[in-house]
Each structure stands twice: as C-alpha cells, then as structure tokens.
Image: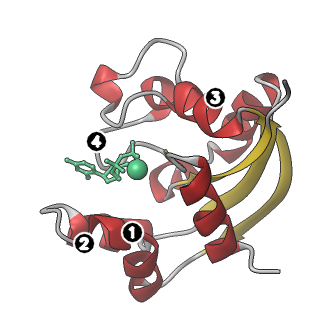
Amino acid sequence: MSNIEQTLSIIKPDAVERNLQDQIKNEFKNKGFEIIKEKKIHISKDEAEKFYKVHESKPFYNDLCAYLSSGPIVVMNLQRENAVLENRKLMGATNPEDAEEGTIRKKYGISIDKNSVHGSDSAENAKVELNFFFKD
Ligand code: CDP
Ligand code: MG
C-alpha cells in the first residue's frame, strides 16, 4: 500500500553559511524526495523558541534557539513514500559522530548542535511543523 507523506526539512545555519544548500537539496532529490515548497528565511529567536517548544525543558534549549535564529535557513516541504522515516534515515543520528556513512549529518554535520539539518520525527509533528512555516 502506498504511503505518500510530506515532512518538514530545514537546512540549518551552519550548512547555509557554508553554501551547502544545493548539495543537500540534491541528497534529497537523489533519494526520491520532491521538494514541493521551499524558502530561505531568517527567523527571530522568538520564532525559534516557538518552533522548538517541545525542547523547552532541555538544557540545550536556549543555545538551540539562539543557533537556529543566528543566520539564514532553508525550510522545505519534502514529499515521497514514507517521507518522515526516509528523511530521518537520510539525515542520520543527531550527533554527526554517531551518524552512519552516507547520511547528511555524517557528510556535512560539524557537531551535535551544528548538525546541518532538521527533520520532523513523526507524521503528526510533520503536519504541525509544515503548518508553522507554510501556513497557506
Ligand atoms: O534533530 P533531532 O530530532 O535529531 O534531535 P533532537 O533530540 O530533536 O534535538 C533537536 C536539536 O537540538 C538537534 O538537532 C541538535 O541540533 C540540538 N541538540 C543539542 O544541541 N544538544 C543535544 N544534546 C541534543 C540536541
Ligand atoms: Mg527532533
């Protein structure tokens, strides 16, 4: 049975700053993802705090929000079969040191905080996160 999904991907400031957005977009396209919406934006710290609200109680929350709002990011609506899970697989582990060969975080990530990409972790969160950036 087919399960075409959409998920939110973000190319984070560390990757945009190093001009990796085209290479990273190609990683998605090569794995069968269609980029159905995308925009380059620079969000405020307040917006980052809303986006990452689920991590509010974590010790890294403040730094994480400061970081996501520190420079331009590229937000994308990605679509393919099982997009949420397939995107998480392609991204690799949160810490690039633990990420498998061939994953985006292994190839491009610098550290656990500067790990180049965000991806929704469930179909439910994908809807919430897509709505956050692409309301209409
Ligand atoms: O991004 P992912 O879903 O893999 O990880 P998360 O646990 O939802 O954490 C969100 C983001 O917080 C990560 O992508 C890291 O950039 C950051 N983080 C951090 O800076 N330090 C940690 N110990 C854990 C996460
Ligand atoms: Mg997460």
Give the mark nearer the N terminus: 3 vs 1. Answer: 1
- Quick one: SS at disc 4? loop
Nearest to viewer (mark 4 / mark 3): 3
Q: Which residue is at the front of the view, 26 or 1?
A: 1
Write the residue at 53% across / 34% down.
Answer: 88
- Quick one: SS at disc 1? loop
Q: How far apart in space, not on screen, are marks 4 and 3 (Cα)?
A: 20 Å
Instruction: Please tell me the numbered disc located at residue 56.
Output: 2
- Quick one: SS at disc 3? helix
Mark 1 sits near ligand 1, with its Cβ under 8 Å away: yes
Q: Amino acid at mark 3?
A: Glu
Instruction: Specify few, some or many for label 1: CA neighbours under 10 Å numbering under 14, 14-19, or 20 or more.
Output: some
Q: Amino acid at mark 2?
A: Glu
- Residue 60, percent across and down? 19, 61
Give the mark nearer the N terminus: 1 vs 4. Answer: 1
Badge 1 is on which residue?
Answer: 52
In the displayed structure, does residue 88 sit left or right of residue 131? left
Badge 3 is on which residue?
Answer: 86
Write the residue at 67% across / 46% down.
Answer: 21
Give the mark nearer the N terminus: 3 vs 2. Answer: 2
Give the mark nearer the N terminus: 4 vs 3. Answer: 3
Give the mark nearer the N terminus: 4 vs 2. Answer: 2
Instruction: Please tell me the numbered disc located at residue 112.
Output: 4
